[in-house]
Image (cartoon, coloured by chain):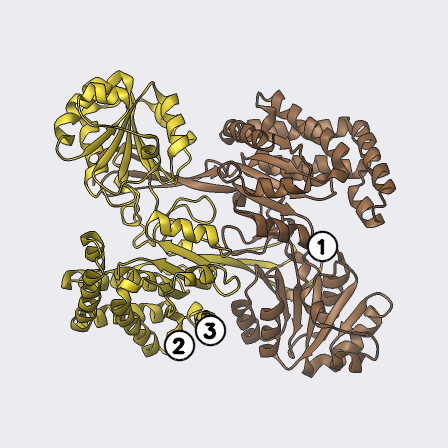
Chain colours: A brown, B yellow
Amino acid sequence: MLRQQAESCKRAARQLAWLATAGKDRILLHLAAQLRQRSEELLSANARDCEAGRQAGLSEALLDRLRLTPERIEGMALGAEQVARLTDPVGREVAWTRPNGLLIRKVRVPLGVLCIVYEARPNVTVESACLAIKSGNGCLLRGSRSALNSNQVLVKIIQECLMAEGLPAEAIAGVADLSHESITTLARMNGLIDLMIPRGGAELIKRVVETSTVPVLETGVGICHLYVHSSADLEMAVPVIINSKCSRPAVCNSLETLLLDELIAVELLQRLDPELRDKVVVRGCERTLALLGWGQAAVAENWDSESMDMILNIRVVTGLDQALEHIQAHSSGHTEAILTRELEPARRFQREVDACTVTVNASTRFTDGGEFGFGAEIGISTQKMHARGPVGLDELTTYKYWVEGQGQIR
Amino acid sequence: MLRQQAESCKRAARQLAWLATAGKDRILLHLAAQLRQRSEELLSANARDCEAGRQAGLSEALLDRLRLTPERIEGMALGAEQVARLTDPVGREVAWTRPNGLLIRKVRVPLGVLCIVYEARPNVTVESACLAIKSGNGCLLRGSRSALNSNQVLVKIIQECLMAEGLPAEAIAGVADLSHESITTLARMNGLIDLMIPRGGAELIKRVVETSTVPVLETGVGICHLYVHSSADLEMAVPVIINSKCSRPAVCNSLETLLLDELIAVELLQRLDPELRDKVVVRGCERTLALLGWGQAAVAENWDSESMDMILNIRVVTGLDQALEHIQAHSSGHTEAILTRELEPARRFQREVDACTVTVNASTRFTDGGEFGFGAEIGISTQKMHARGPVGLDELTTYKYWVEGQGQIR
């Protein structure tokens, strides 16, 4: 059953692959209009999911992620319109002619079939489908059981928009089998699925990475550090630190661990104290707690986990070397930042830190497709192969070479 | 022990990562000179390997791959000089400024540590090391026991050239443990090794792909097809087919299966008969054998294997649809070719065939870094993620984002 869905998705994806940009954009704009028009239907399906969730005892945080509102539906519609405005990567080519007359064309093409595995949020359904459509890829959507009713209506609307443009509905499909095992089955469908994209918590991502034989785009886990060098502008440091930690603690580019150079630790902790007190739980090293006079003692696993909450780890370090060592040991390869007024430590930090984004004198929160100017993204890749950093339309494609001759032999 | 080697390679690779281009080129040119100067030492070490191989009963084909000659040593030296002339990808960047004043720099950086797993050929040692050095990567070379003496001398020479430039020798290291299990151990060293590159036969590649948790660059297996459309220029077809099959049958871009449109099968087989007879073993479908009057009957597994020999599978098909179906079922994603005088079948073939190279009216043998104009390559990638087609210096790097601000918050 799962295999049949994947096979028909792959077949349908071939028709989507070379659909002209105008056709893809019509589907997206039609989808935006339909989402707005059918918001009542969506809200009532979502109400059933939320009610079931409440009865099943889902936490308020999870219920909030599950919930649709008129504003959130409008957000999905605006998202579809935004993707329609993005440049289509498919068919973009560079070409050159060899001395023997062969024309070599390197042409951007869709990957084939994406499989998105995600948790409660129904907006991921629409976001993923829009990026798949614009990049010419088929898409298997494996959402969670808790959002079943919402996702069914959303996929139905998306499929109707595909059909209105003469495309097979199966190109974007909701996976019918939501059993625990279906994730592993999907993750081993080499030849049918080209890329697995888990979108959700660290547990989900880990599970897909570990069981998958299909390539996985590893996104999301952000154990982000900010190191305040002895030369830093402390006036600038306070708002940057507070923004990095507090503006949206549940996202991957928020700050987890603050590393303070011992030369500025006393003064900076004094300045930070009123900003953190009563708002942020501090888990500090011994020196931090002694200087601050409050906070919890950090334990080993704190340095290696993403809190997603108003919790900040703080460690006083002896200098750049110890900061680099700490980051090398605990970084998840997402965003690492330094505050400094000197060129040399900034340069060394940029070169030696092995992460998708290395930020100098700014908040960690800028690692984001929108903030980089890419438009919509499907996540932040923390791996080095294929895509690193914000994953947009370009990264959802590959390329092939078209070699054109007149009978050349070698 | 293996882990220690990988750790010291990773540490050493950090120094290689940002070595200026001039320094890397000096190492490569010095290496070329040393290979020429020390050819006696190399030949005598290699003679010991060949003698041991003969006593162990290695086939003549394997002994030939193992053997070094003054010409082959000169070839390695020329190869090192060629890599020195290639453009250095490391540090190349695109940068843009956001409305809030943030400067975003997307900078090309080395992957980190490559691990090459290969078989008898000692020239792979030098080729891989040269590409690793120029791309700023550390490199663990896991060669075969049969080439032990040759590889030891080669690695010693390479390491002396690194040290002459003030770099730690461990950046390019010959793996000391050549047990069967060492491949699997290496393939699971996530965090120390960034990319596994198996270079050799299908068996070796399959083994690395199946056991590896480190990303693998899958190269090499080429089950290449050539489809002769009914509109093809048959005058052109004969030399293109013969060149694709016979010019070097043991390489991955040579032809395995010829698909003949039924409308031109009679005439083309007549023209091919004298060219193939007594030179090439034909494994044909029923119609092919009936038309040709000689050859062996193809069995199912023939369509799915790479012969590496003067063996050609031939099948008569009813047209483009059946050809596409056959290729979809049996392609290894390497090179697929069509001969046609019409635009529409050429265009459909290019779009629908899912392979790294799709060739129109030319020999399959052009899928090659040199022929594409890329210079040296480490293999032909048959996967879609990260690198597809010839893998040169660019594909041995990744990128990271350097974000530079003046205290921006979000």
Comes first in the chain, label 3 or label 2: 3
Disc 2: CA contacts within 10 A as few (<14), some (14-19) or many (>=20): some
Q: Is mark 3 on a helix, strand or loop?
A: helix
- The mark found on residue B168 in the picture is 2
Q: Position of residue A402 (x, y in %)?
A: 36, 36
Query: Relative to B4, is B273 above or below?
Result: above
Specify whether B128 is left or right of A347.
Answer: left
Residues at marks 3 and 2 on the same chain: yes
Write down the residue under mark 3: B4
Where residue B344 sits: x, y (%)?
37, 22
- Is residue B183 placed above or below A285 in the rendered structure? above
Q: Can residue B84 be seen in this view?
A: no
Q: In the rendered structure, the residue with mark 1 lies on which chain? A: A
| Chain under numbered label 2 | B
Asked if both marks, 3 and 1, belong to the same chain, the answer given is no
Q: In the orientation shown, which residue stands out farthest toward the front?
A: B56
* Residue identifier under label 1: A251
Q: Distance between the residues labelled 3 and 2?
A: 15 Å
Give the amino acid at mark 1. Val
The residue located at (79%, 75%) in the rendering is A271
In the rendered image, the quadrant that contains the N terminus of chain B is bottom left
Front residue of A101 and B211: B211
Same chain for the residues at labels 1 and 2, yes or no? no
Residue at 60% from the left image edge and 44% from the top image edge: A184
Of badges 3 and 2, nearer the viewer stands 3
Q: Mark 3 lies on which chain?
A: B
Question: Could you tell me the amino acid type at mark 2?
Answer: Pro
Which quarter of the image is occupied by the C terminus of chain B?
Answer: bottom right
CA gap, disc 1 and disc 2 = 40 Å
Q: Position of residue B36 (x, y in %)?
A: 18, 69
